[in-house]
Image: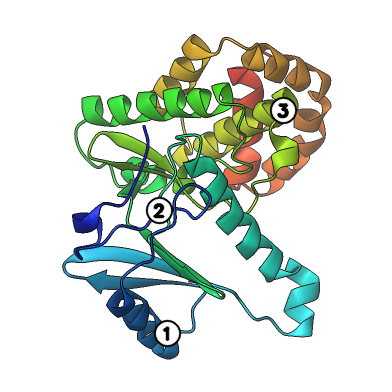
Amino acid sequence: MGKTCEGDCIGVQSRYISPMTETCDPPADLTDRIRTHLATDPGRVSRLEVNERTLWIKQRETLDLRRRLQKGDPSKGFERERAALHHLATIDAPVPPIVAEGADFFALPDCGQPLSQILQQGVGTDAERIQIFRAAGEALSGLHKRGVSHGRPNLKDICWQDGEITFIDLERYSGSRNTPKGHMQDLIMFVFNAHAVAGKPSAEVDAAIDAYRATDTAGIWAAAKAWCRRMRWVEVITKPVRWLRSSAEFDAIPMVFRTFGA
C-alpha cells in the first residue's frame, strides 16, 4: 500500500517523491504558498487549502526555556518525524507522502478522519465502524510485519480515507524501537488508548484487537500478554486512584489487563 503524490493529489501538475528514492522538486508556486501561509500562521501544525485539497503543514516549533525544559527539544521530534516519513516511504509503509518541504517545514496531504473521531462521533453505521477498526488492527499488524514500530499508535494518529488506513504523527518514531519489544509496546499502547477513547466496552475496539491478534504471526500478542501478567500490580496500586477520581486513562488500565487475559 504505497502512498505517492501524483499531480492531482494536491491539485497541481507536479510530482514530489522522497529524495531518498527519487528527487523531484515540488512546484515553486506551492512552496511560495506554503511560505506565505507560514508567515501568517505560526502554529506547529496548520491547515492549508490548495486547489480544493487540504494540506497539513508542520513546522519546527520554537519554545521558551521553561517549555523546552518541560517538553524537550522540539527540533528533535520534528526531524525524527521527517526522517521517519522519508524512510517509511521506501518500504511501502502506510504513511503520508511528503509533498513539499523546506529546512523548517514539511507538508502532508490530508489522510481522512482519525479513528478517535470516528469512534467518539459515531461516524457511519455500526458495521462500517467495525470494518474500519478491523482494518486498523490489520494495518498495525502489517506495520509490525515490516519490522516497523510506530512509537505511539493512538487512535488520533490513525486515519481512514477511501478504504485505507494511514499512520500519522511519527514524532515518537525511532529505529531503535523496530524490534519485537517495540512492536509489543505499540500493541499495548494501541489497546490502552483505544479503551481510553471508547470509555466503555466497544465492538469497534474489539474488532481492532481481534484483527491484530488474528494476523499476528510473530508472537507479539503472546509477548504483550506475558508483559501484562508481570505488570498486573499496576492495576492493584492504581485502584485507589480510580475510586477517588475517574479518568479515561486510569479507567482503561483494568480493561487492558482483561484484554490480554492477565
In the rendered view, would you say 47 is above or below 138? below
Question: Disc 3 marks which amino acid?
Answer: Thr
Label 2 SS: loop
Q: Quadrant of residue 63?
A: bottom right
Q: Quadrant of residue 24?
A: bottom left
Are there few (<14), some (14-19), or many (20+) residues within 10 Å of tag 1?
Answer: some
**Residue depth check, mark 1 versus mark 2: number of the one nearer the observer:** 2
- Left or right, 210 with respect to 133, comes to right
- Left or right, 147 with respect to 99, comes to right
Question: Disc 2 marks which amino acid?
Answer: Ile
Label 1 SS: loop
In the rendered view, would you say 191 is above or below 49? above
Q: Nearer the viewer, residue 190 or 250?
A: 190
Q: Nearer the viewer, residue 47 or 69?
A: 47
Which quarter of the rendering shows the N terminus? top left
Taking the image as drawn, is residue 201 in sight?
no
Residue wearing tag 2: 17
Q: Nearer the viewer, residue 12 or 202?
A: 12
Residue wearing tag 3: 179
